[in-house]
Amino acid sequence: MNHSEVLREKIAARQATCAVVGLGYVGLPLAVELAEAGFKVLGFDVSEEKVAQLMAGVSYIQDVPTERMAPLVEKGMLSAFSDFENIAQADTINIAVPTPLGKTRDPDISYIVSAAEQIARYMSPGTLVILESTTYPGTTDEVILPLLEEGGRRIGEDFFLAFSPERVDPGNPTYNTKNIPKVVGGITPNCTEIAAALYGSALENVVPVSSSRVAETVKLLENTFRAVNIGLVNEIALICSRMNINVWEVIDAAATKPFGFMPFYPGPGLGGHCIPIDPFYLSWKARLHGFEARFIELAGEINGHMPDHVVDRCSEALNSQRKSINGSKVLVLGIAYKNNIDDYRESPALDIIKLLQAKGADVCFHDNWIPGEIPEIIEVPRCGLDASALEQVDLGVVVTAHDDVDYSNLLKILPLIVDTRNAYKGIESPKIFSL
Ligand code: SAJ
């Protein structure tokens, strides 16, 4: 039997050993799904802390309960390593490492390359490698494939390679790794089929496509779609603000249209590690092909401008009481990049705080979802929400509207509020300045 047949049989019989490189919010849930499907799973992460926590049976990912993971570790179905030698035991390897933007906002695929180099060094013949990290079209076939072909390995015979976009939405109560349809595209049809067989053995719905480039582009379309539509609705909000029209009411009424419309909502800017970043992977690659992706760049400009607009609204609100930002005490409500999560990566709240400080404001913040110190704003104090703590506050700005805050009580206590999230939906007050 050739490697392809051997691997298909191992997958069908759940005899394959599956490796997952990168045990974050994408890799750990996938590792648990594969282990629960009956595969022996080896996790790999550069973080010794993550490896130690997993081996102790303690989950550090919100969407993976410890009580679900611990038994898998105890039974030896799931284990973790920080060195790569053991990857030689794997029949399949999923790569789920970060793909940030570099300092010059160019794609930084160094984590992917580093993982691929380690895999090329240790992987055994007949191994299936699947890249899941969001990246520009062409990464799998232009960058990963040559690395794995080193030493004369033949694609589709000595090893198999595919791309499958991660669609994990942390904290989503409805959709999870198991039930979100899984798009997958290989370098060769054989690669696609084997990768689809692996996912089909652990996940509910697999969507094979004709190539790794199609699969890479699917993800970028999904998230560029969001970024551009958020940019559009932010621009509509800026227009409505000048015309004194409540943009939230406009959107809610437009959303009654049962077809041909999908509501997006204006906000203080774009946070998270997907939406503000993924579109620039596509526009960067398009530029290499001589094409300027204007929608992506324009949406980036509009979304990137929203923190400045929020600070302008703070200035207008304070001016209405003959105050200025300079010298005022401003409370920033919500640091996380969206409601009811504990992640503040790329959060516009950080930009808003810096802009307020640059204009002379004395800033404090409140966010129970993010305990402890926040290095990026280490000098900014936390503020309680009781009357005594708020006594000196001149203005509160709702940047992320977590559910655990009593906004009506805040309205009684604070002299002014800038509401960037429609937290005061349907409530009229001269104290409230909307986005
Ligand atoms: N945002 C708006 N207006 C909106 C929607 C979002 O301003 O109408 C802002 C959010 O406040 C946040 C940023 O955009 O700062 C991103 O929000 P998001 O809802 O897109 O959430 P993310 O970043 O967690 O995006 C993830 C993505 N998942 C993956 O990439 C696997 C995205 O594809 C999902 O569609 C999204 O979750 C989701 O639907 O929740």
Image (spheres, rainbow, N blue to C red):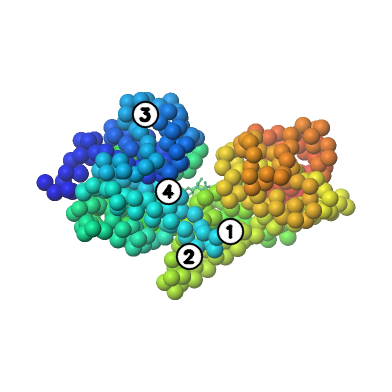
Eye-nearest disc, 2 or 4: 4
Amino acid type for the residue under numbered disc 2: Ser
Q: What residue is disc 1 on?
A: 231
Label pair 3/1, CB-CB below 8 angstroms: no
Judged from the image, the secondary structure of the residue bearing numbered disc 2 is helix
Mark 1 Cβ and ligand 1 under 8 Å apart: no
Q: Residues within 10 Å of mark 3 (few under 14, many from 20)?
A: many
Q: What residue is disc 2 on?
A: 283
Judged from the image, the secondary structure of the residue bearing numbered disc 4 is loop
Side of 393 relative to 375 (left or right): right
Q: What residue is disc 4 on?
A: 97
Amino acid type for the residue under numbered disc 1: Gly
Q: CA distance from mark 2 to mark 3?
A: 42 Å
Q: CA distance from mark 3 to mark 4?
A: 22 Å
Query: Which residue is depicted at the point 40% across and 31% down?
Result: 55
Which sits earlier in the primary sequence, circle 3 or circle 4? 3
Q: Position of residue 260 (x, y in %)?
A: 49, 55
Eye-nearest disc, 2 or 1: 2
Q: Residues within 10 Å of mark 1 (few under 14, many from 20)?
A: many
Residues 165 and 31: in front is 31
Say the numbered circle drawn on residue 73.
3
Side of 67 relative to 18 (left or right): right
